[in-house]
Amino acid sequence: MTIAIYQSCVAALKKAEGIPLLLLRLYLAPVMAQAGWNKAMAFESTSAWFGSSDWGLGLPFPDIMASLAIAAEAGGGIFLLLGLLTRLVSIPLIVTMLVAIFSVHAENGWLAIADPTSWLADGTLYLDEQVLATPEKLEAARSLLQHHGHYDWLTDSGKFVILNNGIEFAATYLIMLLVLFFYGGGQFVSADYWLSKRN
């Protein structure tokens, strides 16, 4: 009896299995589109950053690489929103995330926001001296702002943090994109699903 109830619940859930995929797409679409838009609006500096081996990524053909990244992110965001060519669109976005992880964020460890109390920085799993130095820096910033700025106004929307720029966000996006690559846009909630029904 209990097994039968469980199996009927699983069967009912299968009818809604497109919902988590829709939520992944709705989460990723604006993130990717905004990243592409930002690069497009500052194309010259983006291209310079892609090409510079001194302070950037040191990639060959920086104009082409920047254009490809913009197309992947801005176009990919729109396609993800619609659930159109979801698996195909996920591929260049996965590549973009891998480049971001290994070329930009890896040297900063895991954490995106510096949190010295995290076991991901305090030596329990990984010792991150840069993150462990943040309390002193934040205290110095607070002291300066309390004496010379409008501290209450500056902090009424939230507390100050220090960006660590680790792989946390890019790795999260990568995992989400891998799910979409393997499972697609989802039944009932994607253009892919309805186009497949026409064939």
Image (cartoon, helix red, strand yellow):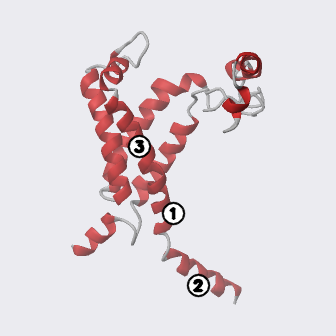
x, y (%) of residue 198? 23, 74
Q: Quadrant of the N terminus?
A: bottom right
**Image quadrant occupied by the C terminus:** bottom left
User: Residue at position x 64%, y 32% from top?
Assistant: 113
Three-letter amino acid code at disc 1? Pro
Viewer-side residue, 29 vs 12: 29
Q: Residues within 10 Å of mark 1 (few under 14, many from 20)?
A: few
Residue drawn at (38%, 33%) of the image: 38
Name of the residue lying farthest toward the bottom: 1
Name the residue tied to disc 3: 32
**Separation (CA) of disc 1 from disc 2:** 20 Å
Residue located 31% across and 36% down the image: 70
Q: Residues within 10 Å of mark 2 (few under 14, many from 20)?
A: few
Q: Is residue 76 above or below residue 132?
A: below
Disc 3 to disc 2, how far (Cα)? 38 Å
Specify whether 132 is left or right of 84.
right
Q: Nearer the viewer, residue 105 or 144?
A: 144
Q: Badges 3 and 2: C-beta atoms under 8 Å apart?
A: no
Judged from this view, the residue extending furthest toward the top is 54
Q: Which residue is mark 2?
A: 8
Give the foreground label among 1 and 3.
3
Q: Of the two numbered discs 1 and 2 on the same chain, state the one appearing first in sequence.
A: 2
Q: Is residue 7 above or below residue 105?
A: below
Q: What secondary structure is found at the residue carrying circle 3? A: helix
Front one among 182 and 133 = 133
Q: Which mark is residue 20?
A: 1
Residue 122: x and y in percent read 77, 27
Left or right, 156 with reference to 70: right
Of badges 3 and 2, nearer the viewer stands: 3
Q: Amino acid at mark 3?
A: Met
Sequence-earlier tag: 3 or 2 = 2
Label 1 sits on a secondary structure element that is helix
